[in-house]
Amino acid sequence: MPNLEYMREIYETLHRHPELSEQEYRTADLIAKELEYLGFAVRRNIGGTGVVGVLEFDGPGRILALRCDMDALPVQEESGVAFASQNPGVMHACGHDSHMATVLGVCRLAAQQRERFAGTLLAVFQPAEEVVVGARAMLEQGLFAEHQPDRIVGIHNWPSLPAGSIGLQAGPITAFADRFRVTFQGAGGHGAVPHKTADPIAMAAAGVQNAFALAQRSTDSSSPQTLSFGLIQGGTRFNVIPSQVVAEGTVRTISSEDQEKMIANLHRAFAASAKLYGGDYDLEYSRGVPAVVNNRDCVEELAGIFAAEIPEVPVRTHGLASLIGEDFTYYLEKIPGVLLLIGSGQAGAVNELHHPSFLVPPKTLETGCRALFSIVKGYLEE
Ligand SMILES: [Zn+2]
Ligand SMILES: [Zn+2]
């Protein structure tokens, strides 16, 4: 079977049977069996349902790790394709099915051509990326205890890049993805006598506006960053001013300096808003996953490999940073590497991750496989 056909079959099978974060049992089983069939030594249940395939070639050499993610999302699929999800309310809407199919496709080629290579290929299938806990769980459970990679390359399909192209950018590529919860504390009362209350609804309204204003007027506009509120709760009845309102949101930045500034801005905005209406505020801020920062030397190495091995594939090298969160960053704290973006955009299709009709075109599998296999050759060929 040609490799593209193999990857499509894997992709469609996985797409049909998506599983939520930390519940990737069937997915892990399929992957482990494929890897075993291809001749990889397989370790299962690392960091939950994580799977690692190890292919040791004959001669000594470098250790290269390829990482993909396994989980789907709580989204009801609306694509209408024949291989649509058979698991109601769950869908591979982020294209992780395509990442797994691509890495398996690369594993298959490497196994078929094993006499060309030396060293070790590690294929890392990571659970629970969407809830950004899978990478850390795998690392804590000895993912690299036996083989410490010299390099790690992760992939994500990227709908803002056309299918057939790839994205390779040095520096920050995803964001610090944090969450916060602010409580405005006032004094409730009758809606007809607001002068006898300290109105937390007024504080929250001002707090949202002031936070937005400072996010725009008091941050460096040359550095991508944003904040959004996703929840506001307070009150029980139209004519009763409540005593408390709670709001929650997310802050996205690409450096810890910007992150600190955003936190200070939130305090200023909420303090001023609470004070204006005679109340108080409490801000709980939790730092989430740090930004993925692609190693410059590795990016240059890969650029050289792509120029030599796949010169016909367009490579975009700038303007790719996004404010999503990705837990690939935890591998990069230990191993030099790159998160490589594989174009998945196509004219006339939904080009938006997490959308109920999002699908990854076959071209993406093909280009992703060529790019990753060229990296295998670049690092491990004798
Ligand atoms: Zn996602
Ligand atoms: Zn994703």
Image (cartoon, grey):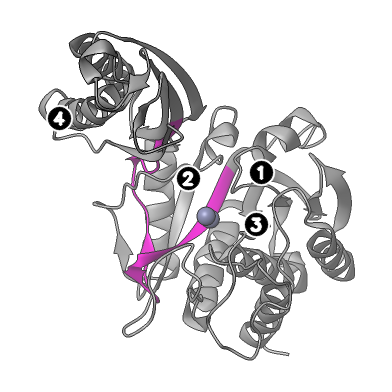
Q: CA distance from mark 2 to mark 3?
A: 23 Å
Q: Element under label 3? A: loop
Residue appearing at x 70%, y 45% in the figure: 61
If you read the primary sequence from the N terminus, does the residue marked by circle 1 or circle 3 appear first? 1
Q: Residues within 10 Å of mark 2 (few under 14, many from 20)?
A: many
Indicate which disc, 2 or 3, sits on the residue closer to the N terminus: 2
Q: Quadrant of the C terminus?
A: bottom right
Q: Is residue 103 above or below residue 13?
A: above
Of 109 and 48, which appears nearest the observer? 48
Residue on which disc 4 sits: 213
Q: Earlier in the sequence, mark 4 or mark 1?
A: 1
Of label 4 and label 3, which has the lower sequence position?
Answer: 4
Residues in magenta, as a range: 152-178
Label 3: few (<14), some or many (≥20) within 10 Å?
few
Residue receiving disc 1: 62
From the top left corner, tell me how far across and down residue 334 is, in percent: 60, 28
Amino acid type of the residue tagged 4 in the rendering = Ala
Front of the two marks 2 and 3: 2
Between 242 and 173, the residue placed more toward the observer is 242
Q: Nearer the viewer, mark 1 or mark 3?
A: 1
Q: Which numbered disc, 2 or 1, marks the residue that appears first in the sequence?
A: 1
- Residue 294 visible? The answer is no
Report the Cα–Cα distance between label 2 and label 1: 16 Å
Main structural element of the magenta stretch: helix, strand or loop? strand
Mark 4: secondary structure = helix
Residue type highlighted by circle 3: Glu
Mark toward the viewer: 2 or 1: 2
- Residue at 35% of width from left, 19% of height from top? 189
Residue that label 2 marks = 338
Q: Would you say the residues marked 4 and 1 are in contact, meaning their CB atoms lie under 8 Å apart?
A: no
Asked whether 174 falls inside the magenta stretch, the response is yes
